[in-house]
Image (cartoon, rainbow, N blue to C red):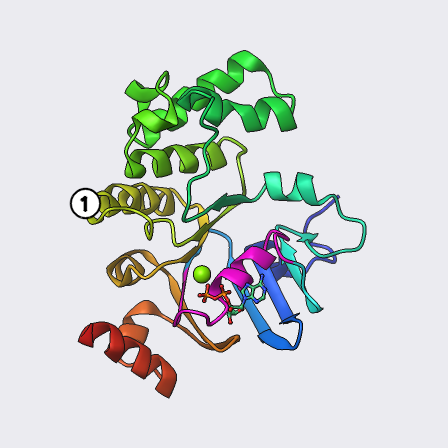
Amino acid sequence: MSATSSTPQNAQDTMIRLSGVEKWYGDHHVLTNVSADVKRGQVVVLCGPSGSGKSTLIRTMNHLEPINEGSIIVNGENVHARGININRLRSHIGFVFQQFNLFPHLSVLENVTCGPLWVNKADARETRALAHELLEKVGLAHKAEAYPNQLSGGQQQRVAIARALAMKPPVMLFDEPTSALDPEMVGEVLSVMKALASEGMTMVCVTHEMKFARDVSDEVWFMDQGQLLEVADPEAFFTAPNHPRAQKFLSDIHAG
Ligand code: ADP
Ligand code: MG
Protein backbone atom coordinates (compact mmCIF):
# COMPACT_ATOMS: atom_id res chain seq x y z
CA MET A 1 0.00 0.00 0.00
CA SER A 2 1.25 3.46 -0.78
CA ALA A 3 2.44 5.34 2.29
CA THR A 4 1.34 8.64 0.80
CA SER A 5 -2.40 8.14 0.37
CA SER A 6 -4.19 9.07 3.57
CA THR A 7 -1.30 9.64 5.99
CA PRO A 8 -0.49 13.29 6.45
CA GLN A 9 3.17 13.97 5.75
CA ASN A 10 3.86 15.14 9.27
CA ALA A 11 2.58 11.94 10.86
CA GLN A 12 5.57 10.12 9.41
CA ASP A 13 8.02 12.80 10.48
CA THR A 14 6.69 12.89 14.02
CA MET A 15 8.17 10.47 16.57
CA ILE A 16 6.30 11.75 19.62
CA ARG A 17 3.10 13.79 19.69
CA LEU A 18 1.83 15.11 23.00
CA SER A 19 -1.69 16.52 22.78
CA GLY A 20 -3.38 18.25 25.68
CA VAL A 21 -1.72 16.09 28.30
CA GLU A 22 -3.11 16.57 31.82
CA LYS A 23 -2.00 14.86 34.98
CA TRP A 24 -2.89 15.16 38.64
CA TYR A 25 -1.41 13.55 41.72
CA GLY A 26 -4.53 13.77 43.87
CA ASP A 27 -5.36 17.48 43.97
CA HIS A 28 -1.97 18.46 42.64
CA HIS A 29 -2.11 19.42 38.98
CA VAL A 30 1.36 18.37 37.78
CA LEU A 31 0.93 18.58 34.00
CA THR A 32 -1.31 21.21 32.46
CA ASN A 33 -2.31 21.03 28.82
CA VAL A 34 1.06 19.91 27.48
CA SER A 35 1.15 19.73 23.68
CA ALA A 36 4.30 19.38 21.59
CA ASP A 37 5.93 17.26 18.92
CA VAL A 38 9.29 15.57 18.71
CA LYS A 39 10.32 14.92 15.13
CA ARG A 40 12.20 11.86 13.99
CA GLY A 41 15.91 12.34 14.54
CA GLN A 42 15.37 15.35 16.74
CA VAL A 43 17.13 15.88 20.08
CA VAL A 44 15.01 17.71 22.63
CA VAL A 45 16.35 18.91 25.95
CA LEU A 46 13.65 19.33 28.57
CA CYS A 47 14.66 21.77 31.31
CA GLY A 48 13.07 23.71 34.12
CA PRO A 49 13.22 24.16 37.88
CA SER A 50 13.07 21.25 40.29
CA GLY A 51 9.51 20.06 40.76
CA SER A 52 8.29 21.57 37.48
CA GLY A 53 7.11 18.20 36.12
CA LYS A 54 10.00 17.16 33.86
CA SER A 55 10.30 13.62 35.20
CA THR A 56 6.56 13.19 35.25
CA LEU A 57 6.27 14.30 31.63
CA ILE A 58 9.08 12.12 30.30
CA ARG A 59 7.74 9.15 32.28
CA THR A 60 4.32 9.53 30.67
CA MET A 61 6.00 9.06 27.27
CA ASN A 62 6.50 5.35 27.90
CA HIS A 63 3.60 4.93 30.32
CA LEU A 64 5.71 4.71 33.45
CA GLU A 65 3.11 7.24 34.62
CA PRO A 66 -0.53 7.27 33.55
CA ILE A 67 -2.17 10.49 32.38
CA ASN A 68 -5.63 11.84 33.16
CA GLU A 69 -6.42 13.52 29.84
CA GLY A 70 -4.95 14.06 26.41
CA SER A 71 -2.97 11.66 24.30
CA ILE A 72 0.60 10.64 23.62
CA ILE A 73 1.55 8.98 20.36
CA VAL A 74 5.03 7.46 20.14
CA ASN A 75 6.19 6.08 16.83
CA GLY A 76 2.59 5.78 15.67
CA GLU A 77 1.36 4.05 18.83
CA ASN A 78 -1.07 5.51 21.35
CA VAL A 79 0.87 4.96 24.55
CA HIS A 80 -2.15 5.44 26.82
CA ALA A 81 -4.69 3.54 24.77
CA ARG A 82 -6.95 1.29 26.79
CA GLY A 83 -5.74 -2.30 26.84
CA ILE A 84 -2.25 -1.55 25.58
CA ASN A 85 0.47 -4.01 26.56
CA ILE A 86 2.47 -1.71 28.82
CA ASN A 87 5.40 -4.06 29.38
CA ARG A 88 5.91 -4.61 25.69
CA LEU A 89 5.62 -0.89 25.04
CA ARG A 90 8.14 0.06 27.73
CA SER A 91 10.64 -2.50 26.61
CA HIS A 92 10.66 -0.91 23.17
CA ILE A 93 11.15 2.70 24.23
CA GLY A 94 14.64 3.30 25.56
CA PHE A 95 14.69 4.87 29.01
CA VAL A 96 17.81 5.83 30.94
CA PHE A 97 17.36 6.86 34.57
CA GLN A 98 19.45 8.84 36.99
CA GLN A 99 20.03 5.56 38.88
CA PHE A 100 21.39 2.99 36.46
CA ASN A 101 19.59 -0.03 37.98
CA LEU A 102 21.78 -2.70 36.41
CA PHE A 103 21.23 -6.26 37.55
CA PRO A 104 24.05 -6.76 40.09
CA HIS A 105 24.21 -10.53 39.68
CA LEU A 106 24.59 -10.38 35.89
CA SER A 107 27.73 -9.52 33.96
CA VAL A 108 27.86 -6.40 31.83
CA LEU A 109 27.30 -8.50 28.72
CA GLU A 110 24.32 -10.27 30.31
CA ASN A 111 22.83 -6.95 31.40
CA VAL A 112 22.87 -5.88 27.76
CA THR A 113 21.62 -9.15 26.29
CA CYS A 114 18.86 -9.95 28.79
CA GLY A 115 16.22 -7.64 27.26
CA PRO A 116 16.42 -9.05 23.74
CA LEU A 117 16.78 -12.63 25.03
CA TRP A 118 14.05 -12.59 27.67
CA VAL A 119 11.55 -10.15 26.21
CA ASN A 120 12.06 -10.60 22.47
CA LYS A 121 13.24 -14.24 22.52
CA ALA A 122 15.96 -13.10 20.15
CA ASP A 123 18.64 -15.37 18.75
CA ALA A 124 21.40 -15.81 21.37
CA ARG A 125 24.37 -15.56 19.04
CA GLU A 126 23.06 -12.50 17.22
CA THR A 127 22.20 -10.85 20.52
CA ARG A 128 25.69 -11.42 21.91
CA ALA A 129 27.19 -9.96 18.76
CA LEU A 130 24.92 -6.94 19.01
CA ALA A 131 25.80 -6.50 22.69
CA HIS A 132 29.52 -6.55 21.92
CA GLU A 133 28.94 -3.97 19.21
CA LEU A 134 27.01 -1.73 21.61
CA LEU A 135 29.61 -2.11 24.36
CA GLU A 136 32.20 -1.09 21.81
CA LYS A 137 30.10 1.94 20.95
CA VAL A 138 29.94 3.07 24.59
CA GLY A 139 33.65 2.37 25.08
CA LEU A 140 33.27 -0.68 27.32
CA ALA A 141 34.10 -3.66 25.12
CA HIS A 142 36.84 -4.61 27.61
CA LYS A 143 34.31 -4.78 30.49
CA ALA A 144 31.92 -7.32 28.97
CA GLU A 145 32.69 -9.95 31.62
CA ALA A 146 32.83 -7.53 34.57
CA TYR A 147 30.02 -7.13 37.12
CA PRO A 148 28.31 -3.79 37.81
CA ASN A 149 29.96 -3.35 41.23
CA GLN A 150 33.36 -3.49 39.53
CA LEU A 151 32.50 -0.44 37.41
CA SER A 152 32.49 3.28 38.09
CA GLY A 153 29.21 5.17 38.00
CA GLY A 154 30.00 6.59 34.57
CA GLN A 155 30.75 3.12 33.24
CA GLN A 156 27.55 1.72 34.73
CA GLN A 157 25.54 4.47 33.11
CA ARG A 158 27.16 3.71 29.75
CA VAL A 159 26.18 0.05 30.20
CA ALA A 160 22.63 1.21 30.96
CA ILE A 161 22.63 3.11 27.66
CA ALA A 162 23.92 0.04 25.80
CA ARG A 163 21.25 -2.06 27.50
CA ALA A 164 18.52 0.30 26.33
CA LEU A 165 19.95 0.36 22.80
CA ALA A 166 19.96 -3.44 22.64
CA MET A 167 16.16 -3.31 22.25
CA LYS A 168 16.68 -1.23 19.08
CA PRO A 169 14.36 1.51 20.31
CA PRO A 170 13.10 4.12 17.86
CA VAL A 171 13.55 6.78 20.55
CA MET A 172 15.63 7.19 23.70
CA LEU A 173 14.39 9.01 26.80
CA PHE A 174 16.89 10.22 29.41
CA ASP A 175 15.92 11.50 32.86
CA GLU A 176 18.92 13.29 34.38
CA PRO A 177 21.36 10.58 33.29
CA THR A 178 24.38 12.38 34.74
CA SER A 179 22.92 13.78 37.96
CA ALA A 180 24.03 10.88 40.16
CA LEU A 181 27.59 10.88 38.81
CA ASP A 182 30.75 12.33 40.22
CA PRO A 183 31.65 15.37 38.13
CA GLU A 184 34.63 13.75 36.42
CA MET A 185 32.32 11.07 34.94
CA VAL A 186 29.70 13.35 33.48
CA GLY A 187 31.64 14.00 30.29
CA GLU A 188 32.00 10.35 29.26
CA VAL A 189 28.23 9.82 29.48
CA LEU A 190 27.42 13.04 27.66
CA SER A 191 29.82 12.13 24.87
CA VAL A 192 28.06 8.79 24.36
CA MET A 193 24.77 10.69 24.17
CA LYS A 194 26.28 13.18 21.76
CA ALA A 195 27.47 10.35 19.50
CA LEU A 196 23.99 8.81 19.55
CA ALA A 197 22.48 12.15 18.61
CA SER A 198 24.87 12.53 15.71
CA GLU A 199 23.84 9.09 14.42
CA GLY A 200 20.30 10.38 14.15
CA MET A 201 18.71 8.84 17.25
CA THR A 202 15.56 10.62 18.39
CA MET A 203 16.16 11.71 21.97
CA VAL A 204 14.36 13.50 24.78
CA CYS A 205 16.74 14.41 27.59
CA VAL A 206 15.92 15.92 30.95
CA THR A 207 19.23 17.42 32.00
CA HIS A 208 20.77 20.34 33.84
CA GLU A 209 23.79 20.18 31.52
CA MET A 210 23.16 23.43 29.71
CA LYS A 211 26.29 23.19 27.61
CA PHE A 212 25.06 19.84 26.28
CA ALA A 213 21.66 21.42 25.64
CA ARG A 214 23.22 24.27 23.72
CA ASP A 215 25.69 22.16 21.72
CA VAL A 216 23.65 19.04 21.00
CA SER A 217 19.92 19.73 21.13
CA ASP A 218 17.76 20.76 18.20
CA GLU A 219 15.12 22.17 20.49
CA VAL A 220 14.85 23.21 24.11
CA TRP A 221 11.62 22.76 26.04
CA PHE A 222 11.25 24.85 29.17
CA MET A 223 8.73 23.75 31.81
CA ASP A 224 7.57 25.39 34.98
CA GLN A 225 4.75 24.38 37.32
CA GLY A 226 3.55 21.66 35.00
CA GLN A 227 3.30 23.86 31.93
CA LEU A 228 5.43 23.77 28.82
CA LEU A 229 6.12 27.49 28.63
CA GLU A 230 8.66 27.69 25.86
CA VAL A 231 9.75 25.56 22.92
CA ALA A 232 12.75 27.16 21.30
CA ASP A 233 15.81 26.83 19.18
CA PRO A 234 18.69 26.36 21.68
CA GLU A 235 20.64 29.38 20.48
CA ALA A 236 17.57 31.60 20.82
CA PHE A 237 16.70 30.08 24.20
CA PHE A 238 20.13 30.63 25.69
CA THR A 239 20.68 34.11 24.28
CA ALA A 240 17.19 35.55 24.64
CA PRO A 241 14.52 33.35 26.24
CA ASN A 242 11.01 34.70 25.74
CA HIS A 243 9.20 33.71 28.88
CA PRO A 244 10.01 35.67 32.06
CA ARG A 245 10.25 32.40 34.02
CA ALA A 246 12.73 31.02 31.50
CA GLN A 247 14.74 34.22 31.87
CA LYS A 248 14.73 33.79 35.64
CA PHE A 249 15.66 30.09 35.37
CA LEU A 250 18.68 30.89 33.22
CA SER A 251 19.82 33.81 35.33
CA ASP A 252 19.53 31.65 38.48
CA ILE A 253 21.73 29.04 36.82
CA HIS A 254 24.32 31.60 35.85
CA ALA A 255 24.26 33.13 39.31
CA GLY A 256 24.80 29.67 40.87
P1 ADP B 1 10.93 17.48 38.17
O1 ADP B 1 11.37 16.21 37.52
O2 ADP B 1 10.81 18.63 37.23
O3 ADP B 1 11.78 17.84 39.35
P2 ADP B 1 8.61 15.93 38.97
O4 ADP B 1 7.96 15.53 37.72
O5 ADP B 1 9.42 14.92 39.68
O6 ADP B 1 9.45 17.27 38.73
O7 ADP B 1 7.50 16.43 39.98
C1 ADP B 1 6.48 17.35 39.62
C2 ADP B 1 5.58 17.57 40.80
O8 ADP B 1 4.86 16.38 41.07
C3 ADP B 1 6.31 17.93 42.07
O9 ADP B 1 5.52 18.86 42.79
C4 ADP B 1 6.39 16.62 42.81
O10 ADP B 1 6.44 16.84 44.19
C5 ADP B 1 5.09 15.95 42.41
N1 ADP B 1 5.20 14.48 42.38
C6 ADP B 1 6.09 13.75 41.66
N2 ADP B 1 5.88 12.44 41.81
C7 ADP B 1 4.81 12.32 42.65
C8 ADP B 1 4.08 11.21 43.19
N3 ADP B 1 4.43 9.95 42.88
N4 ADP B 1 3.05 11.48 44.01
C9 ADP B 1 2.70 12.74 44.31
N5 ADP B 1 3.33 13.84 43.81
C10 ADP B 1 4.38 13.64 43.00
MG1 MG C 1 13.02 14.97 37.88
Measured as percent of width and height from the top left, residue 56 is found at 54, 62
Residue 54 inside the magenta-drawn segment:
yes
The residue lying at 65 percent from left, 57 percent from top is: 73
Pointer 1 residue: 184
- Determine whether, in the image, residue 198 is placed left or right of residue 89: left
Is 50 placed left or right of 68 in the picture? left
Q: Is residue 162 magenta?
A: no
Q: How many marks?
A: 1
For image coordinates 52% across by 58% down, the residue present is 58
Which residue lies most toward the right here? Answer: 83
Residue 82 position in % (x across, y down):
80, 55
Magenta-tinted stretch: 45-65
> In this picture, is 112 found above or below 190?
above
Name the outermost residue toward the top: 125
Under mark 1, the amino acid is Glu
**Residue 72 vs residue 182: left or right?**
right
Q: Residues within 10 Å of mark 1 (few under 14, many from 20)?
A: few
